Amino acid sequence: MEFKITLTTEEIVRGLKHYRRIAKQDILRAPETPNPEVFRRHAEARREVYAKLAEVAEAEGPEAVVRYALELYRSLPFVTGTPEDAYPEIKGQENALENFFLMIGLDPKTRREARKARKPLQ
């Protein structure tokens, strides 16, 4: 699969660090939310994805991290349409990956194809 990445490794890592800080803030403010446990688990899942993506970017570069992110996204079960408080880890991972795709300016067609490849939750 071909895709054009215009960001450097340093720019990607810097963006992911920013997203990780936001997720950390969300973890800290989880007790103030209507559903603290779900909110915390969602934020922790996002933070873990951002950390892993940064690790891959630093070790292997921009192209590799995009390939990794797309593979991870395709492997997630499709849980859209489930109750809001269901599957916070999966939804957090999905949210983190979609944020990453927006950050790097991934072609919407590529995102749609990856989303279609996802299987429904069994």
Image (cartoon, helix red, strand yellow):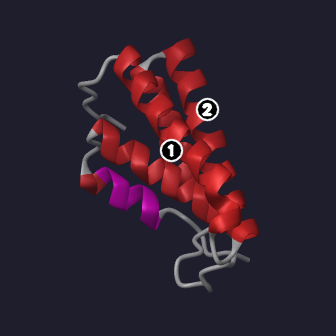
The span from disc 2 to disc 1 (Cα, nearest Å) is 12 Å
Q: Amino acid at mark 2?
A: Ala
- Residue 43 in sight from this viewpoint: no
**Residue located 26% across and 56% down the image:** 109
Which of the image's four quarters has the C terminus? bottom right
Magenta residues? Answer: 110-116
Residue 56: give x, y in percent of width and height: 57, 23
The residue carrying mark 2 is 51
The residue carrying mark 1 is 22
Which image quadrant is residue 77 in?
bottom right
Q: Residue furthest front?
A: 32
Which image quadrant is residue 3 in?
top left
Q: Amino acid at mark 1?
A: Ile
In the image, is 99 to the left or to the right of 105?
right
Q: Nearer the viewer, residue 2 or 60?
A: 60
Q: Main secondary structure of the magenta part?
A: helix
Which image quadrant is residue 43 in?
bottom right
In the image, is 25 to the left or to the right of 111?
right
Tag 2, which secondary structure? helix
Residue 47: give x, y in percent of width and height: 62, 43
Mark earlier in primary sequence (2, 1): 1
Give the label on residue 107, or none. Answer: none
Which of the image's four quarters has the N terminus? top left
Tag 1, which secondary structure? helix
CB contact under 8 Å: marks 2 and 1? no
Q: Is residue 53 above or below residue 62?
A: below
Residue 37: give x, y in percent of width and height: 76, 67
